[in-house]
Amino acid sequence: MTADSYESAEKVMDQVEVLLCWRFPATLFTAAPRLRWVQSMGAGVEDILAAPELPRDITITRVVDQFGGPIAEYVFAELLARVRRLEALREAQRRRGWIDIESETLGGKTIGVAGLGSIGKEIVRKAQAFDMKVHGLSRTLEAASLVDQHFTPGSWPAFVSGLDFLVLTLPLTRETEGVVDLDILKAMPRQALLVNVGRGRLVVEPDLILALTTGEIAGAILDVFSEEPLPPDNSLWQLPGVTVTPHISGPSTVEGVGAFFLRNLERYLRGHGLMGIADRHRGY
Amino acid sequence: MTADSYESAEKVMDQVEVLLCWRFPATLFTAAPRLRWVQSMGAGVEDILAAPELPRDITITRVVDQFGGPIAEYVFAELLARVRRLEALREAQRRRGWIDIESETLGGKTIGVAGLGSIGKEIVRKAQAFDMKVHGLSRTLEAASLVDQHFTPGSWPAFVSGLDFLVLTLPLTRETEGVVDLDILKAMPRQALLVNVGRGRLVVEPDLILALTTGEIAGAILDVFSEEPLPPDNSLWQLPGVTVTPHISGPSTVEGVGAFFLRNLERYLRGHGLMGIADRHRGY
């Protein structure tokens, strides 16, 4: 069964055992006595996990291992555009100006990747191909050997203090919400850039705006925000040094998500363990 | 001794044994009876090698292994900007528009690298980190194992026929001058892009303009041109789908070139073989 509105979904919820959904109102879960498994179309399931209506015996799965490539491409597209000064080059072309535009290289710079799941690992891999120094922060030591220097969540200030670029790929949980606040932004070098491809609420947005305005950091590349769509009157739209994109870093293609769901459905029907099971306690 | 003009150089040429130079008039070589070694500040030495005044017993060296990283960054900065549609995203930001901008990924696309020297190899390495299919063309089989499919100069049409992106890193020689002509451009898929970070005269520029105008290829990213600076009335400046940059892909930094020269000078003084010796017959 497919539903293209919440109203049409509501009418059939009493028959649903498996639900493939995106931004689905958790209130409808209470009208689904047969519901056993909810597959989100995205990588983040914080809304579903936070719903008090969610019965404890329902399995929630998120899409994993689909977003690493595209999100890492987003990060390097934007970082390369900055350091290689593509906007100045385009502007020179418009004026037919053959002028010397000094640029830097990513090679030799230090990138810090907060979150070393499938997305973070792809960013680490590409950063290494660009001969960057790679620092990483994660809850467990599972991926510590992939990076030049590893930090755990107790060491945020030390982690960010040596970075040219801080990239957030963390899930949104009780532990990570607002983890990047004014103290952390002040601990970053003043020439550093923040890149957020995780969730907007990882960052205390007013603190970020303050840090950008006062020059605590040089700029930000933001694909996610506390409120989405980013309201037209939010000052991030036009702060110098800030790139805003409309949550497009990891496109949930119909083909990609569909293929993931079908593989998981086959596992479900055969009674095998599902891929991407979210842990309510962990929060993702 | 240093010279900041051809006139001041001319006055001391009779004492010079070792010459570090860039765009140096070969006529001055005839006034240098003691000249034994000329170190170019760049990667290309086609001008020096072509000078009839160049005595046969003078060694010419070019800078090698310095440009791979920066030039590969240029290639991926520009390719990512295209496929990830950064200009459309910047335009949306200026209008504060939270709109869905469909983009593609580099991952899965096929890149062809013509020339597998130190620059080409760096492009291959980064392309593999982006999960691209990598085809390569080179004179020898030395680097054939690095790419998914290897071609030699006799197979240009087959090489280009399956590409999304054709990147030229070749040196300019009698064999490579004008190698990308209308026939080769027509053999490329119509959605393909040409990227030239080698030398402008690898491409027959009027043929390229024709191919772009008639839609034989989708676009071009050009850092080098037959005539540099690119004249203001050249139509490449404003053809749709064409990116023009002022020969900045591989910045010859004073530090980088200086360090290379000093390492080579030490080898010269000790009588060791020099790095980057150009072969007159080969042409680079």
Image: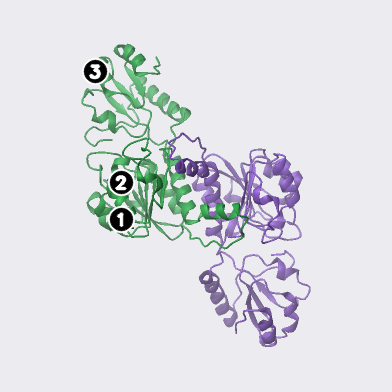
Chain colours: A green, B purple
The C terminus of chain B sits in image quarter: bottom right
Please identify the quarter of the rendering in which residue A98 is found.
bottom right
Q: Few, some or many C-alpha atoms within 10 Å of disc 1 (few <14, some 14-19, many ≥20)?
A: many
Q: Secondary structure at mark 3?
A: helix
Q: What residue do we see at 71% from left, 74% from top?
A: B25
Q: Which residue sits at x=43%, y=32%?
A: A252
Most foreground residue, B23 or B144:
B23
**x%, y% of residue A59?**
28, 25
Residue B90 in the image: above or below residue A108 = above
Q: Can you give x and y, in whole percent of width and height, for residue A136 in the image?
A: 33, 51
Amino acid type of the residue that numbered disc 3 sits on in the rendered structure: Thr
Mark 1, residue position: A160
Report whether B235 appears left or right of A62: right
Residue B155 visible: no
Q: Spot the residue most to the right.
A: B52
Q: Which mark is residue A142?
A: 2
Q: Amino acid at mark 1?
A: Val
**Residues tagged 1 and 2 counted as in contact (Cβ below 8 A):** no
Kindly identify which chain the residue marked by label 1 belongs to: A
Q: Residue A167 appears at what percent x and percent y?
A: 36, 49
Instruction: Tell me the quadrant of the picture where the N terminus of chain B can be found.
Output: bottom right
Say which of marks 1 and 2 sits in front.
1
- N-terminal of the pair, mark 1 or mark 2, is 2
- Image quarter for residue A281? top left
